[in-house]
């Protein structure tokens, strides 16, 4: 009985590491998502979005943001792989969740979706600031656009924006072009220019501004023009991904289903671009696109197959690596023409673009520089929307050994000749000196 | 369906914030209890209704096609069959109310599961839903089966102790009475059953689920009313009128406890009792309405309920929009159907085809009055009784007037907006008056309906010009007229002692001065540093004067080319514009050391990534060597002294006469020279292939050998020469 108990405890400990992993190349499909809501009505009013996530195999757990039982981790292990904050007005989370817990969650490589609203609380704003995004400080401000608004029969204050200023990136937004403008109603934010991890995905048009639509403006608004970001993404250094938007209603069924006509344009779209846009971007956030992994990093001398312990200067070598992209179901070969390898010691001595065979194998060959020391093979791959690859492998390079230099140099023949003629002369002289009379 | 207004998000966005505060308490109460309990429907209102409710003026649209398409999406069956009979009923009922053609496979599958349930001995609950579904699917039920059902349900009625037991069994009996050919189904002791159900009622008009559960609920009240209505219709003889009248009393008490939002939207909600019994406002309100309708249909006489409350309930259901959950959708549609068809009072909803009217296009105000499900209203007149600028409490801008009714479209139309209505946002107040006094008993219209209206128009822009002024004298340095409708390419230059003045006038279609919400002048330096100024106005004239002397610090002492851009926009302005004016060459003084630096500008994300330039290592060039011929020539030269030496020896006449003649010394002499030769040969091998260690080893052996044979040879030669000397 006691033995059984020990075994079961041991097996629990062995399984523990698998329970709380973020996106991991080993088990990329295991995605549990915690959805925190201000009110459970959102579950029904935003059901299309949630259903699209569920249909992609995500296990959504809905909780109210002030539920005293919610927790992100238990016994040091995370219970979820991603967090969706659809609770713009929450002043304090229930349970053990607070700002620091959310940041730790992201620091552990897990993903986050934040939707704020014009009722955004200080807490949600702080989460935004930590992600490099500053929501407009004026609590009554909304994004207004008198030129790029969506034509509507029922409202005329131009806070419903039809925006189509999207980032140009297939990996973030999918390869299919988003034709219809995207409906947005909410607050704008600006990006911290010093933060190069955060990207504007949907920006406002140059005529937009962020202000209270009800009151007269006396001072210029703090956010204007295309500096206003409507939807932003962050990819942290640990490849955790964050989506931040100032509009919760852009996820709603109403916006998903409603048609859209941008002011001043003739075309009426049957359906707004929201569903396509938000579904595609959620694929990016949840690592179904743009997540790369590398395997089989190899290097060897040309004509050999084994990896040497060190290289000699001027050796010809071959370097190869296989790169795959996660497609949501499987690892597919990654195809790009800009993967580069560096041969690096303090600074790159060789930087070369690798060629690929369209099946994910990237390779190149080059000559080891005639400088000896401890080098590194480095692949530092950063591309808009993709996880960054950072491989480095140390390899020493030695100079020639004494017997590896050239042996018979023609230019030295006179010296050899002099020495040997001297020896021959000595041999003859030894006879002459001893026996001549 | 271009953003139809039945969405609270679209209709009333700006009220959200202030509303959220007001509702905080309610939210907390609801959410606290939710935590403990069932969450499916709990607190249905907070988001949707918080938004929809704050503003007094609000628009509600009746059920439209968006509901029909949503219904088809929500009630998706698996090859025609649903998970349970309850769901089947809800789907069928929703399709029936919305007038959606039932798919034949849905009905067929429903019939199959109905006959399965009916044929076997099922619980009253299953039978109830099977019969409910059958009331729409109209499948055939065997006489025998129905007899069995009647007897088992009758047994269930007599054995019932909980409210829900009564509900299912009596509900089942009522349904089978309507469906089967036998019309003689009666409750044996209707009055007794009535009293035992009535025993669950509470003094506040709510009901309990069971006699030992003290908590009362409005949801249970709806169920009880439906049950009692069933008992009344099943009773063989007239029931005691006093029972019915106390019940009517209970209903009005129940309606006293109705909860209310600020704009007159009403709903029922239960105090949270127990997780699995708490239903949420939507289903609770729906249940009460269903009970009320059934009871009103089963009994005679009036139930006195104020029309405003019925209208408030209708607005509650319409304010939700299109729920994304099948259950919620059913509750909404079913409740609206009850409202539409009930005998107490059917609400009429006033809606606008467009709340945004253009003065320039001469849009007419079109009002439609319909029932909640969107069918036509009885003959009535719609009056516009007032119009107010939104946010102000001034007197009405218009006189009361009647809207013309257009029979073809069923719309009430006001063709020309009154002259006093200029561009801007307004609240219009309408009054609906029924033409037939008969109808007033059936329909409720509400006293007045407030509707937000946006009036837009094309704003004339006149007298726009941009000038550079000398600061001290105020004299005009250069002046250019602008055409703000098109792109301008004005080129100006100024220094820090000068001023820039931009002015224009805005006039509404009615000839009044117009103040837009957005009037910005933007100056953008080459380095992308932007400065925004609000253009102020005095009367009609909009003017901004930039005194560069005061702005040098703000401009970070950045001289150079500034692009100028003017943005004028307003919700009421149809020709909002963002126009480039041109550029300004600004000459500012040098920055002092402590001047603020311009803020960092965001970098273009596209330029941040991308491949780097390739690097190839430059190898050391090999040392220069003489040509091989030269080396070979010098090799030849090095042989020459040896040749000279040999020739010299021959010329001197060298001989070998001293070579020992005796065999032993001769052998040593030969070995000695062979040893020397071997050492020299070793050196050649050392050069060709041997390494130092092999060579030294061989030299060691050879050395010992040479010393020995050398000593013998040399001592022999020395002895020979000494003998020669002495001789």
Image (tube, helix red, strand yellow):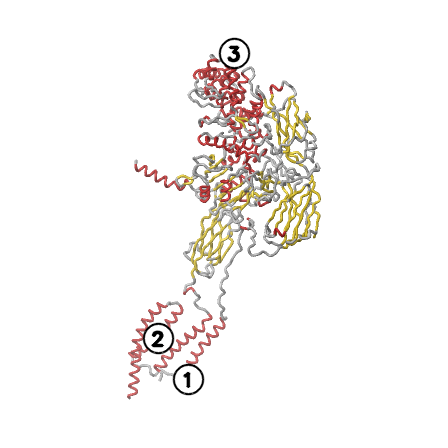
**Residue A310 seen in render:** yes
Q: Which numbered mark, 3 or 1, is in the foreground of this view?
A: 3
Please name the residue shown 59% across and 27% down the image. B62
Identify the chain of the residue marked 3, using the numbered disc in the image. B
Which of the two labelled residues, at mark 2 and mark 1, occupies the earlier sequence position? Answer: 1
Q: CA distance from mark 3 to mark 2?
A: 150 Å
Residue located farthest toward the bottom when viewing the structure as drawn: B727
x and y percentages locating residue B357 in the rendered image: 66, 34
x and y percentages locating residue B458 in the rendered image: 68, 38
Please name the residue shown 60% across and 21% down the image. B443
Of A259 and A170, nearer the camera is A259
Q: Residues within 10 Å of mark 1 (few under 14, many from 20)?
A: few
Q: CA distance from mark 2 to mark 1?
A: 25 Å
Residue receiving disc 3: B238
The label number, if any, that marks residue B651 in the structure image: 1
Please name the residue shown 41% across and 76% down the image. A421
């Amino acid at each position: 009985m006691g033995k059984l108990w020990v075994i079961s405890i041991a097996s629990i400990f062995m399984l523990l590491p698998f329970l709380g992993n973020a996106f991991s190349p080993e088990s990329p499909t295991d995605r549990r998502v915690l959805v925190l809501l201000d009110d459970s009505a959102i579950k029904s009013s935003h059901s299309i979005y949630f259903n699209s996530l569920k249909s992609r195999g995500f296990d959504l757990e809905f909780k109210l943001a002030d539920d005293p039982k919610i927790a992100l981790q238990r016994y040091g292990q995370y219970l979820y792989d991603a967090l969706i904050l659809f609770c713009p007005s929450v002043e304090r989370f229930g349970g053990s969740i607070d700002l620091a817990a959310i940041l730790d969650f992201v620091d552990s490589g897990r993903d986050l979706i934040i939707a704020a609203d014009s009722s955004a609380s200080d807490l949600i704003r702080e989460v935004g600031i930590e992600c490099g995004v500053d929501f407009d400080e004026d609590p009554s401000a909304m994004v207004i656009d008198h030129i790029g608004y969506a034509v509507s029969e029922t409202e005329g204050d131009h806070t419903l924006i039809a925006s189509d200023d999207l980032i140009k990136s297939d990996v973030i937004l999918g390869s299919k072009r988003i034709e219809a403008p995207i409906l947005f109603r909410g607050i704008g934010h600006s990006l911290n220019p010093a933060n190069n991890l955060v990207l504007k995905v949907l920006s406002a048009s140059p005529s937009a501004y962020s202000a209270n639509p009800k009151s007269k403006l006396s001072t210029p608004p703090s956010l204007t023009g295309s500096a206003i970001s409507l939807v932003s993404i962050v990819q942290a250094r640990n490849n955790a991904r964050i989506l931040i938007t100032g509009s919760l209603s852009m996820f709603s069924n109403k916006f998903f289903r409603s048609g859209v006509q941008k002011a001043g344009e003739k075309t009426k779209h049957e359906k707004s671009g929201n569903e396509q846009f938000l579904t595609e971007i959620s694929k990016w956030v949840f690592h179904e696109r743009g997540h790369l992994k590398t395997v089989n990093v190899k290097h060897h001398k040309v004509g050999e197959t084994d990896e040497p312990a060190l290289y000699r200067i001027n050796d010809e070598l071959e370097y190869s690596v296989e790169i795959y992209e996660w497609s949501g179901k499987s690892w597919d070969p990654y195809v790009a023409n800009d993967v580069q390898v560096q041969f690096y010691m303090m600074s790159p001595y060789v930087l070369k673009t690798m060629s690929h065979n369209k099946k994910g194998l990237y390779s190149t060959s080059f000559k080891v520089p005639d400088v000896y020391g401890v080098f590194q093979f480095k692949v530092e791959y950063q591309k808009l929307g993709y996880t960054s690859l950072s491989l480095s492998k140390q390899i020493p390079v030695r100079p020639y050994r004494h017997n590896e230099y050239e042996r018979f140099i023609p230019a030295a023949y006179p010296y050899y000749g002099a020495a040997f003629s001297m020896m021959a002369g000595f041999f003859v002289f030894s006879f002459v000196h001893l026996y001549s009379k | 369906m271009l953003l139809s207004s039945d969405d609270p998000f679209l209709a009333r966005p700006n009220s959200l914030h202030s509303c959220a505060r007001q509702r905080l308490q309610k939210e907390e109460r609801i959410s606290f209890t939710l935590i403990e309990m069932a969450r499916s429907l709990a607190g249905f209102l907070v988001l949707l209704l918080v938004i929809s409710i704050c503003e007094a003026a609000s628009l509600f649209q009746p059920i439209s096609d968006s509901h029909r398409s949503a219904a088809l999406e929500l009630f998706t069956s698996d090859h025609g069959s649903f998970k349970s009979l309850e769901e089947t009923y809800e789907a069928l009922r929703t399709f029936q109310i919305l007038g959606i053609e039932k798919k034949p496979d849905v009905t067929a599958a429903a019939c199959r599961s109905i006959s399965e349930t009916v044929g076997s001995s099922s619980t009253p609950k299953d039978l109830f839903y099977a019969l409910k579904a059958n009331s729409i699917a109209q499948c055939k039920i065997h006489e025998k089966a129905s007899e069995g059902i009647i007897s088992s349900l009758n047994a269930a009625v007599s054995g019932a102790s909980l409210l829900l037991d009564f509900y299912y069994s009596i509900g089942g009996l009522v349904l089978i009475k309507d469906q089967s050919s036998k019309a003689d189904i009666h409750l044996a002791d209707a009055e007794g059953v009535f009293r035992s159900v009535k025993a669950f009622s509470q003094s506040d008009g709510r009901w309990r689920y069971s006699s030992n559960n003290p908590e009362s609920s409005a949801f249970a009240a709806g169920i009880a009313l439906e049950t009692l209505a069933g008992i009344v219709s099943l009773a063989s003889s007239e029931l005691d009128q006093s029972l019915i009248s106390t019940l009517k009393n209970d209903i009005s008490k129940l309606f006293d406890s109705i909860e209310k939002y600020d704009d007159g939207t009403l709903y029922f909600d239960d105090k949270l009792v127990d997780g699995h019994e708490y239903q949420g406002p939507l289903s609770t309100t729906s249940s009460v309405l269903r009970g009320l309708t059934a009871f009103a249909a089963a009994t005679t006489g009036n139930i006195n309920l104020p029309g405003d409350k019925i209208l408030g309930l209708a607005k509650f259901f319409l304010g939700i929009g299109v729920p994304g959950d099948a259950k919620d959708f059913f509750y909404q549609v079913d409740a609206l159907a009850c409202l539409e068809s009930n005998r107490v009072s059917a609400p009429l909803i006033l809606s606008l085809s467009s709340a945004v009217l253009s003065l320039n296009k001469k849009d007419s105000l079109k009002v439609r009055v319909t029932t909640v499900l969107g069918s036509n209203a009885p003959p009535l007149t719609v009056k516009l009784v007032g119009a107010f600028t939104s946010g102000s409490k001034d007197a009405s801008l218009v006189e009361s007037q009647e809207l013309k009714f257009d029979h073809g479209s069923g719309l009430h139309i006001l063709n020309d907006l009154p002259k006093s209505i200029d561009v801007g946002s307004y609240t219009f107040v309408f009054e609906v008056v029924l033409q037939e006094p008969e109808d007033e008993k059936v329909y409720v219209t509400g006293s007045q309906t407030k509707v937000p209206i946006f009036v837009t128009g094309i704003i004339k822009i006149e007298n726009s010009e941009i000038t550079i002024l000398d600061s001290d004298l105020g004299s005009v340095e250069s002046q250019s007229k602008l055409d703000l409708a098109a792109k301008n390419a004005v080129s100006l230059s100024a220094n820090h002692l000068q001023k820039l003045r931009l002015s224009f006038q805005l006039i509404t279609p009615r000839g009044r001065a117009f103040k837009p919400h957005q009037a910005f002048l933007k100056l953008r330096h080459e380095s992308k540093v932007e400065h925004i100024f609000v253009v102020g106005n005095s009367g009609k004239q909009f003017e901004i004067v930039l005194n560069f002397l005061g702005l040098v610090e703000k401009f970070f002492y950045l001289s150079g080319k500034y692009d100028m851009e003017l943005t004028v926009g307003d919700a009421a302005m149809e020709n909002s514009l963002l126009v480039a004016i041109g550029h300004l060459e600004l000459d500012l003084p040098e920055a002092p050391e402590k001047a603020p630096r311009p803020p960092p500008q965001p970098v273009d994300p596209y330029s941040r990534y991308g491949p780097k330039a390739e690097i190839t290592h430059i190898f050391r060039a090999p040392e220069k060597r003489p040509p091989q011929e030269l080396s070979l020539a010098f090799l030849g030269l090095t042989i020459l002294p040896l040749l000279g030496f040999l020739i010299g020896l021959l010329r001197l006449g060298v001989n070998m006469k001293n070579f020992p003649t005796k065999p032993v010394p001769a052998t040593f002499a030969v070995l000695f020279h062979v040893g020397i030769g071997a050492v020299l040969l070793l050196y050649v091998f050392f050069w060709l292939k041997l390494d130092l260690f092999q060579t030294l080893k061989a030299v060691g052996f050879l050395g010992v050998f040479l010393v020995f044979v050398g000593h013998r040879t040399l001592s022999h030669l020395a002895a020979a020469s000494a003998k020669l000397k002495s001789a």
